[in-house]
Amino acid sequence: MQKNAPHQRSFLKWAGGKYQMLDVLLKTLPEGNRLLEPFAGSGTVFLNSNFDRYVLNDINTDLIAVFSCLKKHRQDFIDDCAVYFTQKNNTADKYYDYRAHFNQCTDEYERALLFIYLNRHGYNGLCRYNSSGGFNVPFGRYKLPKLPVEAMHLFIKKLRKAQLSHVDYSTIFKKARSGDVILSLIH
């Protein structure tokens, strides 16, 4: 199951991601037909493993909505994301305006676009919500965050093999069948 280094990075920043552990993870994953990831996060293991099929799950509905929009809208979604990645949108004021809009937004597509903007412009790739469910990561003050278009294209290509869900991890465990591999890391 191991892929030769260097490994592919996800298009998302993700605090506590699995990228640093990939060499060990890929060496220890058993053979199987389908990888079930109950805690998909940025999708790093998905990107760097070689299974026939995948189930990517995360309890974070915003994250799974991003994956779903990428899978369904492909290049149009990337083009729509690019609108946010300009110098004029790389200020604290713009970031907090977009964050407030994200927290009020109910449209899945628009929310997914804003999630990528917030992920790439927010502090340290954090994804954090307050007790009211509002995204509350502060502005990251990066020189000029780039939209990782090439990484998004690789993700889209691989998503053809993936089923997406946002359910409790125990539900994913119950879906396991003979020949499945479950990646059940909790950090």
Image: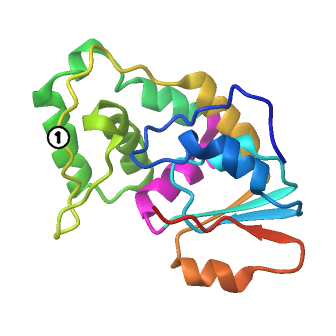
Residue 139, x across and y down, in percent: 18, 34
Tell me where residue 122 sits by quadrant. Answer: top left
Amino acid type at circle 1 is Pro
Residue 57, x across and y down, in percent: 58, 65
Q: Give 125 or 71, whichever is nearer the viewer.
A: 125
Look at 42% across and 49% down and name the residue there: 16
Q: Which residues are magenta?
A: 59-75
Report whether residue 158 is seen: yes
**Residue 102 higher or lower than 155, as above or below:** below
Task: Reply yes or no: does residue 158 show up in magenta.
Answer: no
Which residue has dot 1 on it?
138
**Residue, far left:** 93
Residue 116, x across and y down, in percent: 40, 39
What crowding class fits label 1: few (fewer than 14 Cα within 10 Å), some (14-19), or many (20 or more)? some
Q: Give 17 or 20, whichever is nearer the viewer.
A: 20
Task: Reply yes or no: does residue 61 show up in magenta.
Answer: yes
Indicate left or right for 166 with 110 as reference: right
**Residue 114 higher or lower than 31, as above or below:** above
Indicate left or right for 139 with 163 as reference: left
